[in-house]
Amino acid sequence: MRNSITPLPGGRLRKEYRGTLAWKREITLLRQMAGSGLCPELLDAPHRQVEMTECPGVPLGECVRAASRQEAREMMAALAAWTDAFEREYHRRTGQTAVLEDLSPGNFLWDAASRKITGLDFEFWHTGSPAENRGGLLCMAERLKAAEITGEELTGELYRQFRGGSDRAELEHRAARARQQTALRQRAMPLIRQTAGVILAGGQSRRMGSPKALLPWKDGCFLDQAIDTLWVFDRLLLSANEPVYRQFGCPVLEDRHRGIGPLGALHTALLDAGREWVFLLPCDMPYFRTETVLELFAQADPDRDEACIFSAGGHLFPTVGLYSRRLLPAVERQIASGEYRLRDLFAGRAVRVLPADRPGEFVNVNTPGEYQALLTI
């Protein structure tokens, strides 16, 4: 289950987060935009939770589907007005532009009484240019479904509203980039919905001298970063054997066979994750990106492949990969034989190997020196 929202008495909502990074980003933006009327008001922020006001309205996508042509055009004008006001107010308060990364119709409410838009869900954002926001919104408008107006017409209306506030070439470039990212996600998501993400945090970290998963990184720790990277999985699990990991917002899988490394984690995950596929990611690869996860899933063939892994710099990375439950008998035979190297599982199996375009994403740490070096990059 992804970050969950619970209605509370008195027109309030409680949101609970699986990791701390998304929580910190959201409370930062809500505090920066307090009193703007453009987003919910932050009421309280206990650890990995937010309590906020419940805003009036219905998700924009639902409203557009039921709208007349004129109403749909009015909604696009309101969305453009919200964007202008959001960018202007954020810049007035901080001197920067906040770029929203997860732009979907469900993240905006249309209030028919006030004829205004309210923005929701600020877990993923960064500072950048206004054209990034607007290009993403143009791409979102293309995907809206309406009875009386096409996505192309909706996009045209939104573009007309944006035209005076952004350089046309940059706006079109950003929209094209957003389309590429959307197409990648659309290709990847059918298989991702059949898959549990599993973060490997059960190693003994002997050379490091302390649990690698808990090493400080940015505004959290390595494990927080891995949780953030794998946000696309609605089922996300931690492969770990110590009670300390239960403080995070993900279920913990304890190895059925301890002391045999990632093969034991894979065995437990295939048995207990509750999905036909599992995707493994070590906790100590903080530069690994969500986009790389999507690229793997977009290229995998679930009917033919039993596993899909990366190669980079002449090396295979079996601990970063997608594994089918069809491999379970082979995994159990390998454990019974006492052969615990994960890559030994691949002999005679249908394994797709993808060359990594960005080998730097696969950098991990095993010693205090490597950790200190990583902090200086």
Image (cartoon, rainbow, N blue to C red):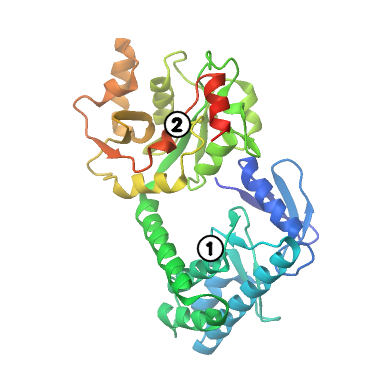
Q: Can residue 193 be seen in this view?
A: no
The residue beneath circle 1 is 103
Vertical order, 5 against 219 (above or below): below
Residue, x 54% and y 58% (percent of image)? Answer: 101
Q: Is residue 182 left or right of residue 377?
A: left
Q: Is residue 45 left or right of residue 341?
A: right
Secondary structure at badge 2 equals: loop
Give the quadrant of residue 271: top left
**Label ID, residue 363:** 2
Q: For mark 1, does the 10 Å Cα neighbourhood hold few (<14), some (14 to 19), or many (20 or more) residues? A: many
Vertical order, 329 against 321 (above or below): above
* Residue 66 image position (x, y, % from top left): 51, 79
Q: What residue type is labelled 1?
A: Leu
* Residue 318 image position (x, y, % from top left): 35, 29
Q: Which of 293 and 263 is in front in this view?
A: 293
Residue, x 72% and y 57% (percent of image)? Answer: 30
Q: Which amino acid does label 2 sit on?
A: Val
Q: For mark 2, does the 10 Å Cα neighbourhood hold few (<14), some (14 to 19), or many (20 or more) residues? A: few
Residue, x 58% and y 78% (percent of image)? Answer: 165
